[in-house]
């Protein structure tokens, strides 16, 4: 058993605090773009500031969700399945992070 | 998976006995009491007793009356009868509390159900096995520890520092808080031989903070190190059942939050990893 309880606790709270302004910003942006088409949305992310903030929201959100899901798995699963589920949980978060980082890079910076 | 349903041999059957009130009984209340005898092959049952409550004010008085006058075989712990010893903690009308301080008037006009403390092994009837609970209390080392030489008189403490222990030292270890906590139900026992994977529960952590907050105790860092893993402290998800049910009106959840604050704010040099590295 690792001694990482406090580290996890701090990261979970810190990511929640970071997500609050990012979520507000994203909600505001989505409301502004209600009804706009695909090109308008792509153009919005193509702005590097928007791309950066959007990428940060997904990446921080994915890590925050990973910690939350790991808490649930640790609470309720006590068999050999626990380690497998924790690994899958970690893998899902990593895939989300890589996918969004790659997408934002291509749309906002390489395009 | 955690055990979300009762094991087959713990499910309450419908063979409960009924003990009607005697002729001429006044102010009759019905006590529905959990019964289990380990010497019998039967599953637990719930017996109902119609009790003359004209001279009964507290639930414990009712249980004692049942034992004295109706059913001497009923087993339950009790001692002080005034909310000091913590022996008569049961689940009464769905909430953990002390039978000796729970008034019948507070329970409305309906039946009174009395079950043992939840999610603990039942020894007999309302008596639960609290060995693990006491082991967890021992784990937090509930006594003053200092590195300085013992003074010739007493360990002195200012009135301000003493006041920090109010709301902590009053705990009577009745186990109402720990056994009302879902997190403690799922993770309150050891998962492996190293003693890891065990949430200590609200009662033990309240006592842990009682010594962490004591100005005379000098092993703060060692005490925090003993709580530093994913289970012992951090399985508390602020469900707050502990504060809701505490018959002494203490707030274990707040004490746990204070420990978490101490964990976060202590210098990095004091974390277990650094301590281990320094030792090597």
Image (cartoon, rainbow, N blue to C red):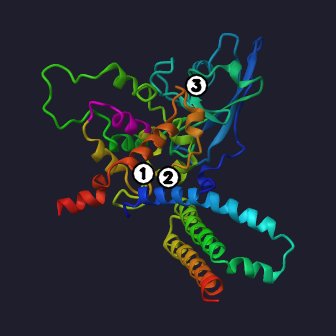
Q: Chain of mark 1?
A: B
Crowdedness near tag 1: few (<14), some (14–19) or many (≥20) residues, C-alpha within 10 Å: many
Crowdedness near tag 2: few (<14), some (14–19) or many (≥20) residues, C-alpha within 10 Å: many
Q: Is residue B46 left or right of residue B134?
A: right
> Residue B252 — which label?
none
Please report whichever mark, 3 or 2, sits nearer to the chain's N-terminal start: 3
Q: Chain of mark 2?
A: B
Quadrant (top left/top right/bottom left/bottom right) for the C terminus of chain B:
bottom left
Same chain assignment for discs 3 and 2: yes
Crowdedness near tag 3: few (<14), some (14–19) or many (≥20) residues, C-alpha within 10 Å: many
Q: Quadrant of residue B72?
A: top right
**Do the residues under discs 3 and 1 have CB atoms within 8 angstroms?**
no
Q: CA distance from mark 3 to mark 1?
A: 30 Å
Whether residue B49 is in magenta: the answer is no
Please report whichever mark, 3 or 1, sits nearer to the chain's N-terminal start: 3
**Element type at mark 1:** loop
Q: Magenta part of the protein: which range? A: B206-217
Whether residue B208 is in magenta: the answer is yes
Judging by the rendered image, the residue that carries numbered circle 1 is B232
Q: CA distance from mark 2 to mark 1?
A: 7 Å
Q: Nearer the viewer, mark 3 or mark 2?
A: 2
Q: Which of the two residues, B22 or B203, is positioned nearer the viewer here? A: B203
Q: Chain of mark 3?
A: B
Point out the residue furthest to the bottom here: A111
Judging by the rendered image, the residue that carries numbered circle 3 is B99
> Residue B235 — which label?
2
Question: Where residue B3 sits: x, y (%)?
Answer: 58, 57
**Element type at mark 3:** loop
């Amino acid at each position: 058993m690792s001694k990482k309880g406090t580290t996890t606790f701090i990261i979970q709270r810190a990511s929640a605090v970071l997500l609050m302004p990012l979520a507000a910003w994203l909600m505001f942006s989505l409301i502004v773009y209600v009804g706009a088409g695909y090109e308008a949305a792509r153009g919005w992310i193509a702005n590097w500031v928007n791309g950066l903030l959007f990428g940060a929201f997904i990446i921080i959100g994915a890590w925050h969700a990973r910690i939350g899901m790991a808490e649930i798995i640790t609470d309720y699963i006590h068999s050999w399945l626990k380690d497998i589920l924790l690994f899958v949980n970690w893998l899902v978060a990593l895939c989300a992070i890589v996918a969004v980082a790659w997408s934002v890079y291509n749309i906002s910076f390489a395009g | 998976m955690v055990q979300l349903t009762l094991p087959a041999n713990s499910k309450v059957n419908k063979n409960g006995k009924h003990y009607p009130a005697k002729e001429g009984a006044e102010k009759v209340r019905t006590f529905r009491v959990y019964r289990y005898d380990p010497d019998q092959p039967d599953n637990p049952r719930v017996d109902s007793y119609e009790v003359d409550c004209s001279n009964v004010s507290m639930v414990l008085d009712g249980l004692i009356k049942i034992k004295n006058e109706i059913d001497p075989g009923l087993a339950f712990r009790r001692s002080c009868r005034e909310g000091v010893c913590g022996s008569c903690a049961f689940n009464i009308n769905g909430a953990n509390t002390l039978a000796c301080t729970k008034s019948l008037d507070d329970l409305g006009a309906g039946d009174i159900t009395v079950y043992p403390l939840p999610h603990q092994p039942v020894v007999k009837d309302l008596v639960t096995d609290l060995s693990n609970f006491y082991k967890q209390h021992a784990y937090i080392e509930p006594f003053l520890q200092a590195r300085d030489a013992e003074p010739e008189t007493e360990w002195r403490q200012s009135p301000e520092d003493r006041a920090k222990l109010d709301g902590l030292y009053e705990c009577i270890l009745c186990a109402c808080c720990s056994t009302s906590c879902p997190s403690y139900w799922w993770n309150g026992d050891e998962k492996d031989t190293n003693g890891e994977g065990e949430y200590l529960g609200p009662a033990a952590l309240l006592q842990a903070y009682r010594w962490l907050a004591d100005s005379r105790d000098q092993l703060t860092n060692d005490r925090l190190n003993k709580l530093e893993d994913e289970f012992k402290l951090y399985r508390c998800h602020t469900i707050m059942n502990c504060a809701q049910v505490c018959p002494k009106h203490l707030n274990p959840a707040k004490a746990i939050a204070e420990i978490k604050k101490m964990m976060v704010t202590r210098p990095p040099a004091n974390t277990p990893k650094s301590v281990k590295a320094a030792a090597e």
